[in-house]
Image: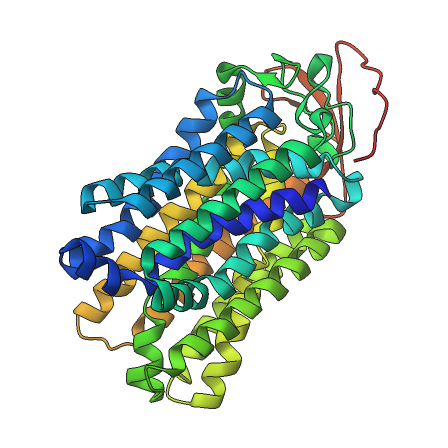
Amino acid sequence: MGLLALALGGFGIGLTEFVIAGLLPQVSDDLNVSTAAAGWLISGYALTVAVGAMAVTATTAVLPQKPVLVALLALFVAGNLLSALAPTYGVMLLGRVVAALCHGSFFGIGSLVARRLVPPERASRAVATMFAGLTVANVLGVPFGALVGERWGWRATFWSITAIGVVALVAVAGLVPGWAGVRGRGGETGVRGGGAGSRDSGAGSRGGRTDLRTQARAFRSTQVWLTLTATALGYGGMFGAFSYLAYTFTRVAGFSSTDVAWLLVVYGSGLVVGNIAGGRGADHNRDATLLVSLAGLATTLAVFGVLAGSRPASVVLVFLLGVFGFATVPGMITRVTDAAGGTPLAASANVSASNVGNAAGAWAGGAVISAGFGYAAPLFVGAGIVAVGLGVMGVAARGAVGARGEGRRGPGGEEVQERRGTGGEEVQGRRNETAVKPTETRRA
């Protein structure tokens, strides 16, 4: 039930992110602003997520994680309430920024808490369950917003999301066990939760609190930076193409503008399938799943570029774009948090990296269109970006394999001895200086 509560929070946050796309004409007319200005309600949200994820997580690093999640959902409710009541464009933009502040930190910290609710071998599936809320929001967000907005006005949409946020806040407060967000002495979580995340080896952790200096040390790890880079490139390639799919569908494949909505539902359905498959695959062999997913994504984008003029091919390929694009999410998050010793800042950094990739990819796709290469060009650019990400992931996987069985230092600088699973993930970490007896495992 704790995982479902986290998924509900993810669903509400996902709705806030995606729903505005179907409401921009109404919002711009009602608030008397240009379409370009209204577009900042999307761009401003994304930029705030990219910057705010790490900033908020760093600020709350010394606090227990469950109360932080509840506070983040309260911030989410406040932001959407501001949007629903906004008398001016400035207040509306402020509401979007406030709501965005909780986005990256909720998914970053929530993914760590989710891992502690399940046995180690199901860590990636737990993360996938939490992110299922986001993928469902991707499928339903724009149609939901358009339907409610058309019937009762755009403000009603934000009132609905505010209500969902209140329910999610109560659910997380009541259903997520307090121990899931608390680490034991010496950095142990004292609960189930996925390999290195199960005994977070960061020194300076006590009672769910990890000091900022300890979390920052995790970024000395080459594996952390390689994984973040692969995340940014994977997302950059996918969203560089996705941002202009409406133009590809209507001006290359010949679909009508009314077809775009159901085509995006097909894409969103692929996200759901990819999220589930990626979580299961990552629990079996994480690095292999990530490599196959990135290779599949690059291939799909390249083939899509070639066959963009075919309607049947476009339907199949946009589904595969969703499948391979989101199959990387559970594995990337568990990989970066394991490499960083389970620190919340690293998990939030992964969300920031994905949003940086989104922004850069969208810019690259727009640049090739502006240069006159046509509306299928972003697909080829996306394929190239993802191919680079695949190369980075290959280097990371090779480094993880080479490090099996070797002694390393944890994010707090202590010596740890690692034993890795089939995907290169850490499944046990012990301090060389002091043997720490595992605490009792508890169930959600």
Horizontal side of 38 relative to 425 (left or right) equals: left
Q: Is residue 418 left or right of residue 332?
A: right
Q: Answer above or below: position of 182 versus 245.
A: above
Instruction: Write the residue at 32% across / 82% down.
Output: 257
Where residue 109 sits, quadrant-wise, is top right
Q: Where 388 sits versus 399, above or below?
A: below
The vertical placement of 410 against 9, above or below, is above
Percent position (x, y) of residue 428?
77, 30
**Image location of residue 288, percent across then percent down:** 67, 55
Please tell me which residue lies in front, 286 or 91.
Answer: 91
Pinpoint residue 380: horizontal percent, then vertical percent.
36, 71
The residue closer to the viewer here, 88 or 2, is 88
The one of 288 and 312 positioned closer to us in this rendering: 312
State the quadrant of the C terminus: top right
* x then y, percent, for residue 151: 37, 68
Q: Which residue is depicted at the point 52% across and 48% down?
A: 164
Image side of residue 425 versus residue 260, left or right: right
Q: Is residue 376 visible?
A: no
